Image (cartoon, rainbow, N blue to C red):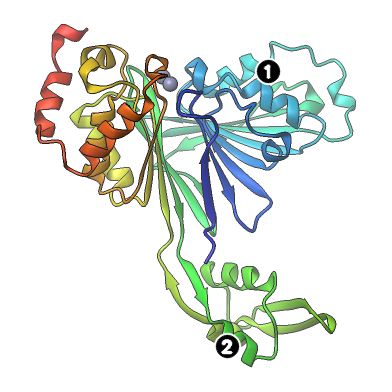
Amino acid sequence: MRQLLEPQLVNDVFGDPGLYVDLHDEPRALLFDLGEVGALPPRKLLRVSHVFVSHTHVDHFVGFDQLLRVLLGRKRALVLGGGPGFIEQVRHKLHAYTWNVVHRYEVELVLDVHEFDPAGLRRHARFSSRRAFALEPVGAGPWPDDVLLDEVLFRVRGRFVDHEMPCLAFAIEEKARPRVAKDRIAALGVSTGAWLRELKLAILSGAPADTPIELRWRDRAGEHSTTRRVGELADVVLDVAPGRRIGYVTDLRFTPANRDTLRLLLAGVDQLFIESVFLDSELAHATRKNHLTARQAGLIARELGARAVVPFHFSPRYEQRPQALRAELRAAWLGRDDRPAAEAAARTADPASD
Ligand SMILES: [Zn+2]
Ligand SMILES: [Zn+2]
């Protein structure tokens, strides 16, 4: 069965960090981090409905302008989420340009920006091309748990890790996945079609049994359409399988507090995308730069019980030997690295490395 979430790194391992998560069966995608995004063709950028920015170091935010350029005049809405100060930073980005004609564009572009802070508050502001992207406060309130976006089919959670500044780590979680029996569909005298997605949505959102579903499908005899109730169709759903969980973790120090936070967010994750910036032989340098070594990334993946790991955000100093970083990460993840994690933690906390 095809997956709902189809993640891919935006750039190669030496390029700016970013994860593009396509939502299968929906005309849209999610984007995590907004560094250089020129590798994504406009058709893919136009699919993006939500962007989550871990932190606003330049390699994670410089692509805002590229994305804006592609969306302007073509797309109606984009939602952005980020950490402390994010609304003001988006405002600064927008106000570096002159907007004396965009209010006349036929397609209005509205940016909804959500700012989360580690104290548990969220703020929401809007910027519209019709009003020259002037800041419009929409609301503010508590952010009681770690959910950044909650939809019927999936949710996005985020928690702050320490990168000598707050930086969001993300979990992208497909909710339960109803599995259907093809033979039972045939027994009803109908064929599969877009209605199956509607039925799955109805089941996951707990719709009443008498909710009508319009079945449309096409076969050799042509177009067909009939209406059935959710209750009548419930039999085609065999069971509900757990959804897949993806982690996106970048720009952080290897501290006990960060590792605790990641456990709360990502224990048992199916696929973990994690930065692996330096080799462990350059631990002191990695520590000064507030980044993970490949070994530390592997230890984290092991602690989380990650079922698959994809490293990225390699330092350009390894351009000739990216395999060394991959091998180091893999050895730590598989437990083939015999030095205990505590030793690495103690060395990371060494005050000699500023
Ligand atoms: Zn970075
Ligand atoms: Zn950074």
Q: Residue at x 34, y 28 (%)?
A: 276
Residue 127 versus residue 154 in the image, above or below: above
Amino acid carrying mark 2 in the image: Arg
Can I make out residue 146 in this image?
A: yes
Residue 295 versus residue 316 in the image, above or below: below
Residue 176 versus residue 309 in the image, above or below: below
Picture coordinates of residue 141, whole percent (x, y): 48, 36
- When asked about the image quadrant of residue 273, the answer is top left
Picture coordinates of residue 209, whole percent (x, y): 58, 82
SS class, disc 2: helix
Picture coordinates of residue 186, whole percent (x, y): 64, 88
Residue sitting nearer the eye, 87 or 44: 44
Image quarter where ligand 1 lies: top left
Q: Residues within 10 Å of mark 1 (few under 14, many from 20)?
A: some
Q: Residue at x 63, y 18 (%)?
A: 91
Residue sitting nearer the eye, 303 or 227: 303
Q: Which residue is mark 2?
A: 184
Location of the C terminus by quadrant is top left
Q: Nearer the viewer, mark 2 or mark 1?
A: 2
Residue 324 versus residue 156 in the image, above or below: above
Q: Is residue 64 left or right of residue 242?
A: right
- The Cα–Cα distance between marks 2 and 1, rounded to whole angstroms, is 54 Å
Residue sitting nearer the eye, 309 or 327: 327
Q: Which residue is mark 1?
A: 94
Which mark, by number, is residue 327?
Answer: none
Amino acid carrying mark 1 in the image: Leu
Residue sitting nearer the eye, 90 or 346: 346
